[in-house]
Image (cartoon, rainbow, N blue to C red):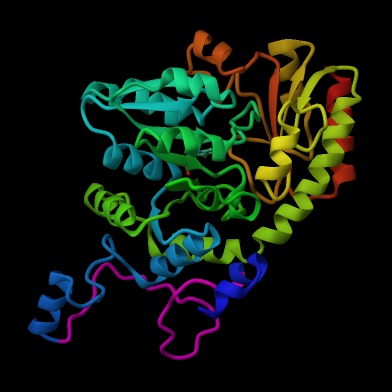
Amino acid sequence: MKNKKLGINSRMIHSGEFENAIGSATVPIYQTSTFIFDNAEHGARCFSGEEAGYIYTRIANPTIHALETLVADLESGVKGIATSSGMAAVNTVYMALLSKGDHMVSSAAVYGPSRVVMEQHWSRFGVESSFVDTSNIEEIKNAIRPNTKVLYIETPANPTMDITDLKACVEVAHAKGIIVVVDNTFCSPYLQRPIELGVDVVLHSMTKFLNGHADIVAGMIVTKELDMGAKLRSMMVTMGCNMDPHQAYMVIRGIKTLGIRIERAQESAMKIARFLEDHPKVDWVRYPGLESHPQHGLAKTQMDGFGSMISFGLKGGFEAGKVLMNNIEVCILAVSLGGVETLIQHPASMTHSKVSAEAKAKAGITDGLVRFSVGIEDAEDLINDLAQALDKV
Ligand SMILES: *Cc1c(COP(=O)(O)O)cnc(C)c1O
């Protein structure tokens, strides 16, 4: 309770519920699959829900509970549901909220697999979907059908960095009883808290910023309402895409430095974005902190900072992208994002290679587009690295 009054940096360190039996300074790893009942009556009370005791780790576990309450608090939500991965969080949301004959409207430029799984697999069970430019509210309005149940948004979008106005989306969707879901992976609650803007469900790939050290794959769902939390938890438990206690411990540890990691990375990102903007081989740069970003004004009001994700286009297209990838020395050539190490990747040949050419074009993913996740190294080293690699393009 007292934590509610603390600032977000303090809550990253002190929030999260756990029963501290012996005065441990950190949350212990309860590496157990099952929990002992005091007696038959106690077991019966736990199963009936009359008493909130631990039963089995797929259902709940104290280490995982500490992480769930921590992230729910940071997101200004009421319930957290930890999952084995970000995609487990995405699929739990799809499975719980969409039935045969239902329709979802989503940002076109979402994380590749979030779109592919909907179009190739959920469609097999009769779920319909439309992928539109959600940064244009008119496109959302036009895509809504009588059977639309979910509006699914990523902002800033991946990898175009387009920004969607969450308050406007909530207004349009709620007027029609549509649930609004936001994948908040790119921002983390340090930079953006969609629930405070009226969004119903937030999800994360905690593999990225929240854990931040590129050593764990993990996901989280946070809800604005208790009922929605119960519905999503029950789906996660029955699908069995729960987190492991050791994974939870690692993410709790990672979150402690989320604020200082993001502050450092976004300071460097601003410098790098400006360097790229002035570079002759670079066609365009998309970073919410640049005045040239089409939604710079919206980014300023919706986000508490501009983050550390940059997209830029090379004049030389697909080939130039490959040359840049092959000559980088300090940055790491790898997919993923949000870690302490700077990562660079080329969506056309990597993450979005399975997305159709037409869908790529509609989502603004060009052949020369490079995605850059700025880490916490010295900004000067990152700029020098990009400069020498761009010389070879
Ligand atoms: C990585 C990512 C996911 C998927 O998360 P995993 O942890 O890899 O399963 C979903 N959404 C976004 C925006 C991501 O970056």
Q: Position of residue 366 (x, y in %)?
A: 65, 14
The answer to whether one can see residue 307 in this image is: no
Q: Is residue 190 left or right of residue 248?
A: right
Q: Nearer the viewer, residue 377 or 120?
A: 120
Measuring 32% from the left and 43% from the top, which residue is drawn there?
92
Region rendered in magenta: 13-38
The vertical placement of 152 against 391, above or below, is: below
Identify the image quadrant of residue 81.
bottom left
Q: Residue furthest front?
A: 175
The vertical placement of 256 against 53, above or below, is: above
Task: Please say whether residue 217 is one of the residues in the magenta stretch.
Answer: no
Q: Is residue 183 left or right of residue 280?
A: left
Measuring 49% from the left and 41% from the top, which residue is drawn there?
182
The answer to whether one can see residue 237 in this image is: yes
The mark total stands at 0
Q: Main secondary structure of the magenta part?
A: loop
Measuring 85% from the left and 28% from the top, which residue is drawn there?
276
Q: Position of residue 237 (x, y in %)?
A: 25, 54
Image quadrant containing the C terminus? top right
Task: Please say whether residue 23 is one of the residues in the magenta stretch.
Answer: yes
